[in-house]
Structure formats: C-alpha cells, structure tokens
Image (cartoon, rainbow, N blue to C red):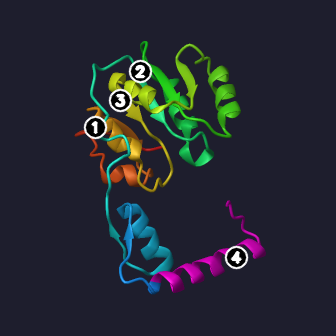
C-alpha cells in the first residue's frame, strides 16, 4: 500500500509498526532475507534479525553464455523498480548496444511512451513476462544486467546474473543488490 502524509495514513502506519513490533518480539528468533530487510526491522521496530540468504529458484538451471550485444533488465514494471532509469541511461549509451526489459506491470504504457519519446524504439524492447526457459536464455546471452530498483529487499536477479557470469550495473540506493555488487569488481554502482 502506498501511504500518503495524511492524518489517517500516518496513524495507520504507526499502528502497523506497533503491531509488527509487538508480534515479532514474541518470536524466539528473527531472520530476514537480506541485510537490507534486517536494517529496516532495526530502524522501524528496533529489532535485530539475522539475514539468511537463499539461492534463486532457478539457480541449478542458470548457465553462462557468450556476452551478447544487449543489457538485460528483469523486473516488475512498477515505479519503485525504476525501469525509467534504465531507459534514460540507454539514451546515453553509444554504439549498437540494446536493452531487453523482461517483466510486466502497470508502468508498461508509460515506459513505452518514454522509449518512443527518446527515439529508442530500435534499441529498447519491452519483452513482457518471460517463462523460465526464456529468462535462462536471456541471462546467458546478456552483456550485463542493468538493475535499478529503489531499496530492493534482496534482488534475486542479481544472483541470477552472477550465476550466468554476468556483471550487474546498479545504483547507490538499490538496497539488496548492494550486498552483492562490488563496484569495479563484479559490476558497477552508479548514482541514480
């Protein structure tokens, strides 16, 4: 739910935090999927959780392949995933490198309009939702993964890219991916 800064929403948010804290304090142990999520529990609930990283669902099937002439973005097409940043970046990329965006969501029409406005119709493809086999092929053939969310919890696609032996380009405020991407080592970290 998107909360606004209204009296009702502020009150509801406060009550939800209180209930979360009360219930979570009853647990014998607290675990989260990443340090980013543990940090949120600490910040909002003053509770400590141990991150337990688990592999992506497709880990055993992902393979590497030759570096292609496209960057890959895999994400729901929603505002918080900031696919618009990836598209804006493509307007600055020289050469014939393309961007394939795999995923579906409510932002597709706005993203398609932005692609057209920037004249990137021949370089950016909104592939829609892809099945597992196609995702594995896209990962294997990508030059790199471009993943630009805001405060992502974990970001399985980061690990999927690494399993395919592809670097990850992300942002300084992407959250979970920063637990794995080392700037200049296994990817690049840039300001949004």
Report the residue marked by disc 2: 70
- Which numbered disc, 2 or 4, marks the residue that appears first in the sequence? 4
Q: Residue at x 38, y 61 (%)?
A: 33
Q: What element carries label 4?
A: helix
Question: How many numbered discs sit on the rendered protein?
Answer: 4
Among the 4 quarters of the image, the one containing residue 16: bottom right
Image coords of residue 51 (percent x, y): 33, 65
Report the residue marked by disc 3: 144
Q: Which range of residues does the magenta coloring cover? A: 1-24
Q: In which quarter of the image is the N terminus?
A: bottom right
Q: Distance between the residues labelled 2 and 1?
A: 18 Å
Image coords of residue 165 (percent x, y): 26, 32
- Which numbered disc, 2 or 3, marks the residue that appears first in the sequence? 2
Q: In this view, does 180 lie above or below 18?
A: above
Q: Residue at x 48, y 24 (%)?
A: 99
Q: Distance between the residues labelled 3 and 1?
A: 12 Å
Q: How far apart are marks 1 and 4 (CA)?
A: 41 Å
Q: Distance between the residues labelled 4 and 3?
A: 41 Å
| Image depth: mark 2 or mark 1 in front | 1
**Badge 1: few (under 14), some or many (20 or more) residues near its Cα, within 10 Å?**
many
Q: Residue 163 carries which label?
A: 1
- Which numbered disc, 3 or 1, marks the residue that appears first in the sequence? 3
Report the residue marked by disc 4: 12
């Amino acid at each position: 739910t998107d909360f606004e800064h209204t009296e009702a929403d502020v009150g509801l948010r406060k009550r939800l935090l209180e209930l979360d804290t009360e219930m979570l304090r009853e647990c014998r142990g607290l675990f989260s999927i990443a340090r980013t999520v543990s940090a949120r529990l600490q910040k909002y609930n003053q509770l400590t959780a141990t991150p337990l990283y688990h592999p992506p669902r497709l880990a055993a099937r992902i393979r590497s392949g030759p570096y292609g002439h496209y960057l890959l973005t895999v994400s729901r097409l929603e505002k918080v995933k900031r696919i618009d940043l990836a598209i804006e970046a493509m307007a600055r990329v020289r050469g014939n490198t393309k961007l394939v965006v795999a995923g579906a969501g409510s932002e597709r029409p706005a993203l398609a309009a932005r692609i057209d406005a920037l004249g990137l119709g021949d370089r950016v493809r909104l592939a829609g939702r892809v099945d597992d086999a196609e995702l594995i092929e896209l990962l294997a053939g990508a030059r790199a993964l471009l993943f630009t969310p805001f405060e992502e919890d974990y970001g399985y696609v980061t690990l999927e890219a690494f399993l395919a032996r592809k670097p990850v380009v992300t942002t300084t405020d992407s959250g979970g991916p920063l637990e794995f991407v080392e700037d200049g080592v296994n990817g690049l970290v840039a300001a949004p």
